[in-house]
Image (cartoon, rainbow, N blue to C red):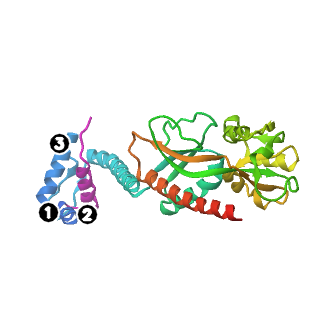
Amino acid sequence: MVDVELRHLVTMATIVEEGTFGRAAVRLGYTQSTISQQIAGLEKSVGGAVFERPGGPRPVRLTPLGTVVLDHGRELLAKAESLSEAVDRFKAGGGRIDIGTFQSVSHVILPALIGRLRQEQPGCEIRLTDMPAEAPQIGELDLLFYDRAIDGDVEQLRLIDDPHLLVTRPGDLPDGPVTLAALDGRPIVGCHEACDQIWMGPATDAGARPEVVFRTPGNETILSMVRAGLGWAVLPWLAVYGADARSDKRLAVHQLQPAPTRGIYLHWPATAAQSPLAVRAIEIAREIATEIVAGLGQFGRS
């Protein structure tokens, strides 16, 4: 393998552009003897002369070997420059980030998060992975949103407390809060069993035995079933807000008392060094969570 130093290739390319060793030395800020030493080192590495030196003020010319070296050398210099730019972008917060998510977060938190990241770092790459409803693994992800704390070698941040709400058709119940006991015997359109357990347990403790008549993992489908009169739904505030259900005249949204609440967590690997982009994403997620909490407060007062 030919052992060539990038600085020697830079010097060679500058000599070709300037025409003489002397002018190349001025441009690079070297002495002419330094330039000669670098080319001598390059020629030793490749095993032959790369320049014909006519002497005097006449410009130097590449030898056939020099042409081969410079052609491939320019490719190496371009890759080195690209690497340098990539490192600079990484340090500045660019690069790529892989995020695991689920539908409520995808509809409410992620649009704002991605928008702010791309505004700050237009060239960054963000890849999303939909996580399973049960037992998600952080794996190679940089960040993972989930509605429970996950086990493993991870750091975690509880972003918000997300209360569940009751969604019915207008006129099914008087306006205002509804007790969990009022769910007794009512047909319910459910989500995954693991998700529904967050509110089913407290409802059972309150003496209610709701009947789950249909299950679907899609919040929009659940709300469509409610509109069709197939049953009520108990959904987290993020899901109701993300679907804009409160402005839908075919639906009525009620607070539950007491309100079953899930946590929205952000996880990241505990053992891996975080990129600046991931660090900034966590900071932005905190900011968005603060805004959501304010929105929850307004909902409670309305």
* Vertical relation: 237 (above or below) 193: below
Look at label 3 and name its amino acid.
Lys
* Along the line of sight, the residue nearer the viewer: 164 or 17: 164
Q: Residues within 10 Å of mark 1 (few under 14, many from 20)?
A: few
Magenta region: which residues? 1-20
Horizontal and vertical percent position of residue 245: 76, 56
Q: Residues within 10 Å of mark 3 (few under 14, many from 20)?
A: some
Q: Which of the two labelled residues, at mark 3 and mark 2, occupies the earlier sequence position?
A: 2
Q: As drawn, is 262 to the left or to the right of 66?
A: right
Q: Residues within 10 Å of mark 2 (few under 14, many from 20)?
A: some
* Vertical relation: 269 (above or below) 26: above
Query: Which residue was labeled with disc 3?
Result: 44
* Residue drawn at point x = 69 percent, y = 41 percent: 202
Placement of the C terminus among the 4 image quadrants:
bottom right
Horizontal and vertical percent position of residue 243: 73, 54
Residue 10 on the magenta segment: yes
Q: As drawn, is 149 to the left or to the right of 194?
A: left
Question: What is the chief secondary structure element of the magenta stretch?
Answer: helix
* Along the line of sight, the residue nearer the viewer: 283 or 251: 251
* Residue drawn at point x = 18 percent, y = 60 percent: 21
